[in-house]
Image (cartoon, coloured by chain):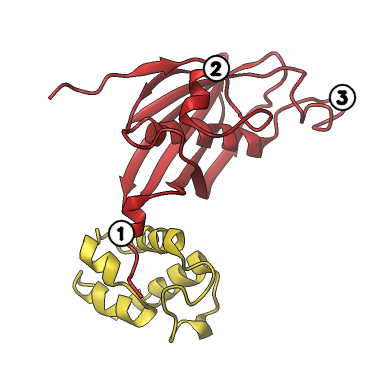
Chain colours: A yellow, B red
Amino acid sequence: MSNLEKYNNVFCETLQVEESQLKNLEYQGVELWDSVGHMTLMAALEDAFDIMLDTDDIVDFSSYEKGKEILKKYDVEF
Amino acid sequence: MMAEQSFSLDSVQILEYQPNRHPYLMFDKVIDVLPGKYCIGVKNLTNNEWFIPVHFPGDPCMPGFLQAEAMTQVCALTLLTMEGNKGKVVLLTGCDKLKLFKKVRPGDVMVIKTELLSYRHGIAKGKGKAYVDDKLVSECEMTFTLADSDERRMLTPKI
């Protein structure tokens, strides 16, 4: 499975969205991406990519696309 | 700095630390809890439980998902006994790897051993194992968070 597939799967499973919704998805853009959903999403990404996100990156992780930029800092290439 | 001490909680004291109440309180006391680490609780199952008449007539036993709830409630005390968390509401966000090995019946004493595996960004991951007569009857892993979490609030994107 590619990193993009893994990334998408985490989003779809955690936030219960379709892949077609991901491109423009932002924090609080769907009901499940609230403060609890955000932390659940961060924990799921950490598990999926075996990384530990810094506090600043968790706060900056405001959208699906922004998340891809952030994960590149952790050597996750898309 | 002194190492944190473990302690026990009786049936009254557990009400101070967590908000679940009868008939949804799924354990009776805590025999040992070390904040942030582990918690061991006890549930004495009786014929007076609300679910026994319906689960099942002629074959009374504790529903498996209520065993998972019992493990979660006990594990939550690893957080709720940490400084500043007493009495807060805990939200379950995930329950994985639930396995049910043996029926738990009225008269059984269920010993629930739980461990906090991690607590990062306000999200806790724990695991629990329940025993009757020293035999494993169920186990699961759970993810939960405090409903009112300053840490989680500070870590959410600002929009």
Front position in the image: B115 or B74: B74
Q: How many marks?
A: 3
Q: Which residue is mark 2?
A: B11
Q: Look at the image and tell me in which quarter the C terminus of chain B lies.
A: bottom left
Residue B4, percent from left and from top: 24, 23
Q: Are marks 2 and 3 in contact (CB under 8 Å)?
A: no
Q: Quadrant of residue B110?
A: top right
**Disc 2 to disc 1, C-alpha distance:** 35 Å
Q: Position of residue B155 (x, y in %)?
A: 31, 61
Horizontal arrangement in the rendering, residue A32 relative to residue B116 (left or right): right
| Disc on the earlier residue, 1 or 3 | 3
Distance between the alpha carbons at the discs numbered 2 and 3: 30 Å
Residue drawn 31% across the image and 52% down it: B151
Same chain check for tags 2 and 1: yes
Residue type, numbered disc 1: Met
Q: Nearer the viewer's eye, disc 1 or disc 3? A: 1
Q: Which residue is mark 1?
A: B154
* Disc 1 residue crowd, few under 14, some 14–19, many 20+, Cα 10 Å: some
Q: Secondary structure at mark 2?
A: loop
Seen in the picture, residue A48 relative to A78 is either above or below; the reply is above
- Identify the amino acid type marked 3: Gly
**Residue depicted at x 47% and y 68%:** A33
**Residue B45 picture location, percent across and down:** 67, 19
Tell me: residue B75, above or below residue B1: below
Q: Which residue is mark 3?
A: B58
Q: CA distance from mark 1 to mark 3?
A: 52 Å
> Which corner quadrant holds the N terminus of chain B?
top left
